[in-house]
Amino acid sequence: MLKKRLIISLTFNEGVLFRTKKFLPDYRYTKNFVDLWNADEIILIDVSSKGKKLQKSFLDVIRFFIENCYLPITVGGGISSIEDAKKIFSLGVEKIIMNSSTYKNPKITHDLINIFGSSSIIQAIDMKKNNDGSYIIKVDNGKTTINRETNEYLEFVSSLNIGEILLNSIDNDGGLMGFDLNLINKFSSKINVPILVQGGGGNWNHFYEVLKLKNISGACTQNIYHFTEISLKSAKKYLLSKNINVRYDN
């Protein structure tokens, strides 16, 4: 049985570490504070708005993590061409995340899968709840609603032979009140590839609630206070006590 993963997700804007809720900076912390011993992977996301392309400041962030930690690293944000992907993979990154570019030009993601393999490509889906309880998909860092029906788009993305899908709740992002289980349960059946979830994890039981689900392969924590050796080890210990198969190093 594959082990479930606990993943650190960090958001950067022009090289500055940001809170994910409304993309607000937190200058009390830098990328240097992260203790990575007990995480399984790390995700680095760039939300810089300049030209919506790879920024030198973000490439410097990627290099820092490649040089200073031994975890598999996934990178997303501003990847809109084969050349962008080659540049990132050449740094030693294991996977890349696609989002808006897939919606705007699916051929790019299709070509990336053919070149680098499906296991190297993750598709992010940012979802927001309407007042009537329905969900819509957003791109461009949550600024634009896609012009496609939600279920249909999820099925389309799954058909691309993507390695994994990162399902993010915009509403719960940064709130620490728990993952949107209604969203996850409603749409996970529409997705035939492993799913990562993000947005809302605030305590270890929140992670248990999603990792116990069959097709959820990992949960992302964005809470800055989770990023210590002791707390991540505590999370793994708690999950093991609940019979969740996770990697645990004594």
Image (cartoon, grey):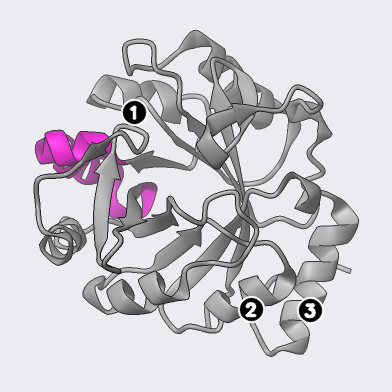
In the displayed structure, would residue 21 be above or below residue 196?
above
Disc 1 target residue: 85
Question: x, y (%) of residue 133?
Answer: 30, 69
- The front one of 144 and 104 is 144
Disc 2 target residue: 208
In the displayed structure, would residue 100 be above or below residue 114?
above
Residue in view at x 40 percent, y 66 percent: 195
Query: Crowding near pointer 3: few (<14 within 10 Å), some, many (20+)?
Result: some
Q: Indicate the secondary structure of the residue bearing disc 1.
A: helix
Which amino acid is tagged 2? Tyr
User: Is residue 106 on the magenta stretch?
Assistant: yes
Disc 3 target residue: 238
**Cβ atoms under marks 3 and 1 closer than 8 Å:** no
Query: Crowding near pointer 1: few (<14 within 10 Å), some, many (20+)?
Result: many
Left or right, residue 156 beside residue 178: left
**Cβ atoms under marks 2 and 3 closer than 8 Å:** yes
Distance CA(mark 2)–CA(mark 3): 8 Å
Left or right, residue 234 beside residue 144: right
Which amino acid is tagged 1? Ala
Which amino acid is tagged 3? Tyr
Question: x, y (%) of residue 46?
Answer: 48, 27
The mark that comes first in sequence, 2 or 3, is 2
Considering the whole magenta stretch, tell me its main secondary structure: helix
